[in-house]
Amino acid sequence: MNRREILDLLFRMPWPELRAAAQQQRRAAVGRHVFVRGLLEFSNLCRRNCRYCGLRRANRPLRRYCLSRSAILAAARQAAAAGVDTLVLQSGEWERPPHWLAAIIRQVKAELGLAVTLSVGEMPRDHYACWREAGADRFLLRHETADATLYARLHPGHHLTERLRALEWLAELGYEVGSGFLVGVPGQRPTSLADDILLVRRLGVAMCGVGPFIPQAATPLALAPHGDVPMTLRVLAVLRLVLPTAHLPATTALASLSPDDGQRQGLLAGANVLMPSFTPAACRAAYRIYDNKAQVSLAAARRAITSAGLRHRLPAVLPSGDSAHV
Ligand code: 5AD
Ligand code: SF4
């Protein structure tokens, strides 16, 4: 599929047709199973100043936290008991001695047997190597936008080339690599979404996270309009067609703009991954990358999967209605 054809799918094909094509492709390529990952936002410290994100360094009043090793392990145990297949360890970007995180990865793998995905930003290659050695399986690092000029404007002091180099290192080190991008971030030409899709295809990513931009009050983009939900769903559907076997999450940002059925709509558009949060309640408000962020619980994930007519491998809910974590 070339750029012209991707643009046709994105902007011209009637939605019912596009969605049906994506659903057919999903059935053929990945079936009806939905993977459930446990998301643990273990620190909101960040050295970067991305113009769209509430965790940016310049947001001084934000209370910053970093969970202790024992708090991370406690949350990981909860996620494992709830039946997730993977622990996603996410944080803002800050450089620390890599051994701290390596020890946590080792313990999660040894004690709980979960797959571990890291999402901790751009780091030196030897940090990535150390974590891989410790047993980390996958790494999420969104390219955010394939438009190099816009990338530089949104990320003061940084360039898309550095991001792509980091993604290359991760692949060389044997990580399963995930990228992704924002839909409707201010300054984005709609046609550049086709370049985002072509870029993730060229990178050959195993995962791709796509969500609408949502403004955050403490950022320079506070007053900008949010990204479009229908457009985000169209991008997901086209990604399913272009990367048939990729893991595509229905993102929290999608759920935040459509609290009633964003996740279900994402699944119906071709997504096959949900990432409910296991971040301790006391920290959630401080992980405010954008405003009105939904709390995607395991119970909500389960409902979205069932109501989309799809399957999961979560343990049955106890008769009392209590599952390990709701
Ligand atoms: N709206 C939507 N998504 C955002 N992210 C950061 N800030 C925002 C925002 N305001 C996304 C980025 C990042 C991921 C962790 O969260 O794409 O990679
Ligand atoms: Fe930091 Fe990531 Fe937010 Fe950028 S998007 S400010 S790197 S947490």
Image (cartoon, rainbow, N blue to C red):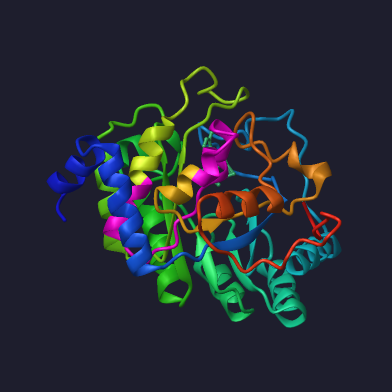
Residue drawn 54% across and 54% down? Answer: 121
Q: Does the segment drawn in magenta span residue 120? A: no
| Farthest top residue in view | 223
Residue drawn 84% across and 64% down? Answer: 74
Q: In this view, does 222 lie above or below 81?
A: above
Q: Does the segment drawn in magenta span residue 249? A: yes
Q: In this view, does 76 lie to the left or right of 88?
A: right
Where residue 177 sits: x, y (%)?
45, 66
| Residue 191 found in image quarter | top left
Quadrant containing the N terminus is: bottom left
Q: Is residue 257 above or below residue 70?
A: above
Q: In this view, does 240 lie to the left or right of 87?
A: left
Where residue 44 sits: x, y (%)?
69, 45
Where residue 268 sits: x, y (%)?
43, 49
Where residue 323 sits: x, y (%)?
80, 58
Range of residues picked out in magenta:
236-264
Query: In this orientation, does residue 238 appear?
Result: no
Q: In this view, does 154 lie to the left or right of 69?
A: left
Q: Quadrant of ligand 2?
A: top right
Q: Is residue 170 above or below residue 306?
A: below
